[in-house]
Image (tube, grey):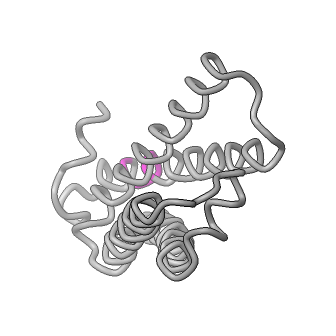
Amino acid sequence: MARARTSVARGVLAAIGLLYVGIGLAALLSPATVAGYADITLEATSAKSDVRAVYGGLAVGLGVFFLVGAVHRPWVGPALLATLLTFVGLLAGRITSVVIDGSPGAVVYLFTAAELVGAVASGWALLRLRETQREEPDTEGPAAIDALK
């Protein structure tokens, strides 16, 4: 049972990691296309640079961290916590925008739904991993997920 919970956690991390790396590479290679999905136009060179850095480089870096967490057992808990906090932060930004700026376009609602799915999947996998740690305290690496007690 514990192995199955760890496999679920690693699968969630791998899926999220691949998604982040894919989105990041797309933003690095074609920032205007990626920004265009959110109706953002990139006229200035500095705007393209910012999209390449934040949507591209940051996303690739996080994605690689999530993938390392999926394959390096002691990092599973910390990486899952990072995915959860990343998605919660994105959702907080979306909610703040709706309150301050009003209703966004349909594509942004699709992004929001994907981020909500990511947050729920990350939280669920993290809770399952925590159950495993209770049953086998020395098998899941550092107790970083104990912060959720």
Q: Main secondary structure of the magenta part?
A: helix
**Front one among 139 and 17:** 17
Along the viewing direction, whichever of 130 and 98 lies nearer the viewer: 98
Q: Is residue 72 left or right of 29 when viewed as pictured?
A: left
**Res 15 quadrant in image:** bottom right
Q: Residue at x 69, y 60 (%)?
A: 36
In the visual, does 90 lie left or right of 131?
right
Q: Position of residue 107 (x, y in %)?
A: 78, 50
Query: Farthest right residue?
Result: 106
Q: How many marks?
A: 0
Could you say which quadrant of the image residue 75 lies in?
bottom left
Establish if 101 lies above or below 109: above
The residue lying at 57 percent from left, 60 percent from top is 42
Residue 19: percent from the left, percent from the top?
56, 71
Highlighted magenta segment, given as a residue range: 126-130
Which residue is rendered at x = 31% and y = 77% of the image?
68
> Is residue 75 shown left or right of residue 113?
left
Decide which of 66, 46 is in the foreground and name it: 46
At horizontal 30% and vertical 48% (from top left) the residue drawn is 134
Asked if residue 29 shows in the view, the reply is yes
Height in image: 75 above or below 121? below
Q: Residue furthest front?
A: 44
Is 129 covered by the magenta stretch?
yes
Question: x%, y% of residue 21?
Answer: 48, 76
Question: Considering only vertical position in the picture, is 39 above or below 94?
Answer: below
Between 36 and 43, the one lying in front of the other is: 43
Q: Is residue 11 visible?
A: no
Q: Is residue 26 left or right of residue 73?
A: right
Q: Give percent across and percent down for residue 115.
A: 61, 48
Instruction: Tell whether position 78 is magenta.
Output: no
Quarter assignment of residue 50:
bottom left
Up-down relation of residue 16 to residue 113 (above or below): below
